[in-house]
Image (spheres, grey):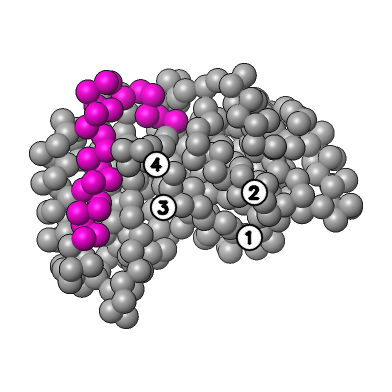
């Protein structure tokens, strides 16, 4: 496994791989790798000759009051995880390497961002899109792997790839969960012990919503109420949002139909957790 901190050196190597007709699978991450990331790496390993993982905590996607400083980091451990999952290249740039000077172009995502996390995190997806456009140009992957835990991010990346004509296949990968159903996240380590016990209620609430939908409920407000009462009963967290949209367009619906997302964000003391379920309804 090779570790690159320099953009030019990585690009030189990647271009050589491309000359040798090797396919490149790419897993962008902010590090503190967990089983969710490992699952993405395994998927990339199965489908490509070369697997590249980037580890970069991107300051542009954190708001002024968000957790950029406290975002967990452990590069030594990340290297072991990547090695165990047969990654070929780690790209581990510094902030100065990625953003050496004031930008001359700014990226603004204008669709699929005024709902869910985009609504409460202004500028977040502009930062995600900016770094991914740079990373896609640096890594030049054939396929890029993203976890569906952040389904809005997947919808935004889909827009970036299409709008900027990147010759990249977006591979959405299902959410990996703890045994009790809590979606794996680097941020879970910041939960207090009692919050960790309560946190699986987020997924349980989503499953109750799915059950109601499968049993014929088509009113989005009723579904939201089911999830809201459950999470409020079972946790001391504060609900940031519970929303239902068409997926991946993220448009509001009066009556549930087609492919939909139910997405939830809950704030605990030191961490805000998100989760979602995508459901394909048969009533189209
Ligand atoms: O999902 C993440 O970890 C980040 O948003 C990403 C895609 C690596 C961009 O910084």
Please tell me how crowded label 1 is: few (under 14), some (14-19), or many (20+) other residues with Cα within 10 Å.
some
Residue at x 21% of width, y 57% of height: 209
Residue 177, labelled with which disc?
4
Image position of 78 with respect to 238: above or below: above
Residue at x 17% of width, y 62% of height: 212
Using the rendered view, name the quadrant where residue 191 is placed. top left
- Please give the residue where the numbered disc 3 appears in the rendered image: 152
> What's the CA distance linking mark 2 and mark 3?
21 Å
Where in the figure is residue 106, as x and y percent of width and height?
Answer: 55, 45
Magenta region's main secondary structure? helix
Residue 169, labelled with which disc?
1
Q: Nearer the viewer, mark 2 or mark 3?
A: 2
Helix, strand or loop status at disc 4? loop
Using the rendered view, name the quadrant where residue 246 is placed. bottom left
Q: Nearer the viewer, mark 3 or mark 1?
A: 1
Residue at x 40% of width, y 29% of height: 187
Q: Nearer the viewer, residue 123 or 208?
A: 208
> What's the CA distance linking mark 1 and mark 4?
25 Å
Q: Nearer the viewer, residue 176 or 137?
A: 176
Helix, strand or loop status at disc 1? strand
**Magenta segment boundaries in residue numbering:** 186-211
Is residue 241 visible in the rendered image? The answer is no
In the image, taking residue 64 as reference, residue 254 lies left or right, namely: left
């Amino acid at each position: 496994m090779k570790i690159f901190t320099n953009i030019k050196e990585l690009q030189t190597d990647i271009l050589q791989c491309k000359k040798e007709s090797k396919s490149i699978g790419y897993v962008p991450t902010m590090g503190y790798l967990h089983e969710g990331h490992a699952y993405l790496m395994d998927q990339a390993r199965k489908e490509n000759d070369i697997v590249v993982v980037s580890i970069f905590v991107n300051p542009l996607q954190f708001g002024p009051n968000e957790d950029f400083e406290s975002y967990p980091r452990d590069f030594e451990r990340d290297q072991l995880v990547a090695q165990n999952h047969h990654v070929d290249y780690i790209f581990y740039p510094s902030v100065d390497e990625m953003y050496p000077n004031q930008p001359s172009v700014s990226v603004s995502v204008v669709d699929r961002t005024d709902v869910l996390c985009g609504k409460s995190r202004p500028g977040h997806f502009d930062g995600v899109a900016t770094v991914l456009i740079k990373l896609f140009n640096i890594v030049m992957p054939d396929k890029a792997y993203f976890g569906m835990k952040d389904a809005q991010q997947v919808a935004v990346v889909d827009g970036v790839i299409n709008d900027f004509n990147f010759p990249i296949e977006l591979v959405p990968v299902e959410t990996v969960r703890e045994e009790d159903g809590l979606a794996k996240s680097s941020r879970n380590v910041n939960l207090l012990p009692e919050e960790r016990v309560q946190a699986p209620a987020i997924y349980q609430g989503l499953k109750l919503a799915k059950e109601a939908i499968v049993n014929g409920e088509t009113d989005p407000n009723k579904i939201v109420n089911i999830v809201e009462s459950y999470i409020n009963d079972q946790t001391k967290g504060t609900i940031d949002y519970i929303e239902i949209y068409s997926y991946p367009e993220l448009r509001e619906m009066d009556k549930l139909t087609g492919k939909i997302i139910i997405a939830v964000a809950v704030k605990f003391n030191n961490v805000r957790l998100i989760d979602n379920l995508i459901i394909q309804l048969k009533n189209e």
